Image (cartoon, helix red, strand yellow):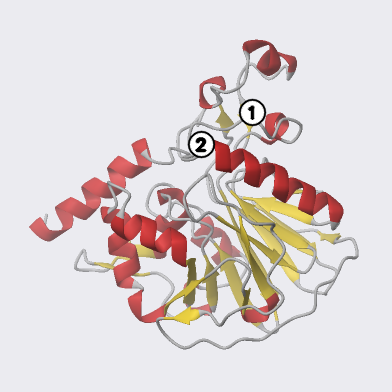
Amino acid sequence: MKKHLIPLIAAIATFAIVGCNETKTPATENKAAEPAAKPAPVEKVAPAEQNAAPTETAAPADSASAVEGTKTIILANGAKAIWIQDNDGEKLNPRSLFSDASDSLFASLNMPDGLPASVSTYLVQTDGKNILFDAGLGAFGGQTMKRLEALGIKADDINIIYLTHFHADHIAGLVTKDDEGKDVKVFKNASVYAGKIEYKAWMKRIPKNDLQKAVMGIYKDSLHLFKFGESLPHGVLALNAVGHTPGHTAFQFGNLLIIGDLMHGYALQKDHPEINSNYDMDKKKSIESRKRILQYARDNKLLMAGMHLPPPGFVE
C-alpha cells in the first residue's frame, strides 16, 4: 500500500468507529431559524449559479418507487424529493446512545432492541437539476450510489451537494479510489455547499480531522461556503441547527425541511427534544436547536427529512 494513503485510510477508519459512529448494526448512530430578510452573498471558492424557487406550503404527495431503499415524494412546488437509505439492512440505535434518557422513559417506548433509524441521503430534482443532500458512508457500506444508479442517475448527473455537517457518515461518500488507489471525487460535476462555521471548526479546531481535510481538499475547486440564513441555489435556505456539530445545518426547500442529525432516535426525541444522543457535541445548543427546528416545522407545516429518521425517511 502506498505510504501517503495510510494516514487517510486510518483517519477514515478511526472516525467511522469513534466519531459519529452510525454505521454499526444491529444497534448502531442563535438566532431563530428563519432566514435573514436580505441575505449576504455566499462566499464562493468557485462560482455558482443562484436560482431562487418559491416556497410552497401545500401537502406533499407520495409517488411509488420500484427501487429498494428509496421513497419518492412530490413536493408542493412540483419538485421530487427522494429518500435514499444509505445503510444496508435494518438499523437500530441502542439504549446506550441516549444517556440523557432515564431508564423509565426509554422503557416506556417498548423498544428494548433499540430505536428504528437509518443512515440516509436525499435527492431533490428541480429545475432540471439533481441536488443531493449529504453523501453518506461511501466505502463503509454506503448504498447511495448503487440506489442512485438504480434510479437512472449517475454520479456525473449530480449538480449540487449540500452538506449538513462533516461527520464521516455524511461526507465519506464524496470520495472514492481510482485505479491507482488515489482518493478522487465521486461527483465530478457537482458544486459542494458547506457551512462556513462547520468548515472552519473542522479545519482548525476539531481533532482527528484528517478525513475532513482530505475531502475538502479534493473538492476545493468546487467548494462554496455559506452563512446561516442565506438563500442558496434553487431557493434552498440554510438554517441554524448547531449543537450536533459546531456548524450543523438544516436546509429548507419549499415545504421540505432537511434536518440532518437533529434526531438519532425519532421515537424518543420527537416528544422529548430535551434528550440528546451521545454524538451531539454541544448538548445545550443541540437541545435548543432541536426544540426550535421542530417548532418551526410545526408552525410552517413542513415535511421533515432526516439523515437518521427511520424508514421511509419522511415525517410530518
- Which residue in the protein does label 1 denote? 115
Q: Quadrant of residue 31?
A: bottom right
Left or right: 245 as drawn, with respect to 75: left
Left or right: 221 as drawn, with respect to 115: left
Q: Residue at x 79, y 55 (%)?
A: 303
Instruction: Give x and y (percent) for residue 206.
Output: 32, 49
Quick check: 54 above or below 13? below
Looking at the rendered structure, the secondary structure element under dot 1 is: strand
Instruction: Give x and y (percent) for residue 22.
Output: 48, 39
Quick check: 158 above or below 213? below
Disc 1 marks a residue whose amino acid type is: Leu
Residue that extends furthest to the top in the rendered view of this protein: 104
Left or right: 34 as drawn, with respect to 229: right
- Which residue in the protein does label 2 denote? 29
Disc 2 marks a residue whose amino acid type is: Glu
Q: Nearer the viewer, residue 222 or 40?
A: 40
Quick check: 157 above or below 96? below
Quarter of the image containing the N terminus? Answer: bottom left
Residue that extends furthest to the front in the rendered view of this protein: 31
Residue 263 visible in image: no
Q: Which mark is residue 244?
A: none
Residue 226 visible in image: yes
For the residues labelled 1 and 2, the Cα–Cα distance comes to 10 Å
Q: Residue at x 66, y 86 (%)?
A: 51
Q: Residue at x 55, y 46 (%)?
A: 119
